[in-house]
Image (tube, rainbow, N blue to C red):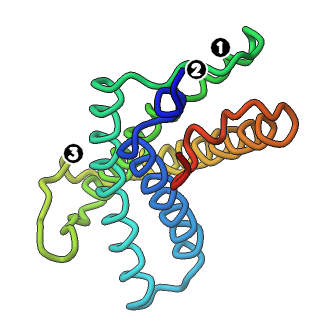
Amino acid sequence: MTTSSKRYTGTAIALHWLLALAILGSFVVGLYMTELPMSPQRLKLYNWHKWAGIVILTLSAIRLLWRLTHRPPADVPMPGWQRKTSHAVHLALYGLFFAVPLAGWAYSSAAGFPIVVFGVIPLPDFVSPDKELAEAIKPLHKILAYTMAALVLGHVAAAFKHHFVDRDGLLDRMRPGRA
């Protein structure tokens, strides 16, 4: 097996890490902004958070299309339960890459707060304004975000376990800049 067939493509690696940084940044901003008193700063952060959600949604769609049209490298040998868990976590993460920003968009629309990406591109309401619906969606967005954070932590822990304990080269398949 060649080195290139053991690694993800450069595009897949770039999308992985861009999405990881966007999700981490959005999660941190989300935690921080909700603790602020009502102020221009809080409103600015809410807008940035919404913009990040739309960027995450877009990157997720691009990443999914790339993944569906480009074969991943061969699997690293591991016990069957680890392979099944890995596939389940990846499937759940892909679902959450879409569910979290869509729930946020739905909440924002239901609450009557439009999303204008980068202050320039107005998005249509995802759902009609409805305060009761907004109150139902708000905790869903939070639960989905925390679920994604937990799965990401598990994903990172598993990658480190494979790298430092198993030393099986799994992490090198997605590491940037290494051929």
Q: Depth-wise, is mark 3 or mark 2 nearer the camera?
A: 2
- At label 1, the amino acid type is Lys
Give the Cα separation between the discs numbered 3 and 2. Answer: 32 Å
Give the image location of residue 127, x and y in percent: 21, 45
Residue 89 in the figure: left or right of residue 56: right
Q: Badges 2 and 1: C-beta atoms under 8 Å apart?
A: yes
* Mark 2–mark 1 distance (CA, rounded to whole Å): 5 Å
Tell me how far mark 3 sits from mark 1, CA to CA: 36 Å
Residue drawn at (51%, 66%), measured in percent from left and top?
25
Number of numbered labels in the structure image: 3
- Point out the tag, 3 or 2, that comes first from the N-terminus: 2
Amino acid on which the number 2 mark rests in the picture: His
Secondary structure under tag 2 reads: helix
Residue at 45% from the left image edge and 46% from the top image edge: 13
Residue matched to label 2: 87
- Label 1: which secondary element: helix
Location of residue 59 in the rendering, given as x and y in whole percent from the top left corner:
32, 49
Q: Quadrant of the N terminus?
A: top right
Which dot marks residue 84? 1
Q: Where residue 14 sits: x, y (%)?
A: 41, 51
Q: Nearer the viewer, residue 96 or 88?
A: 88
As drawn, the label of residue 127 is 3
What is the quadrant of residue 111 in the picture? Answer: bottom left
42 sits to left or right of 142: left
At numbered mark 3, what does the secondary structure look like: helix, strand or loop?
loop
- Residue at image point 37% right, 81% down: 43
Res 136 visible = no
Of residue 79 and residue 60, the one placed in the foreground of this image is 79
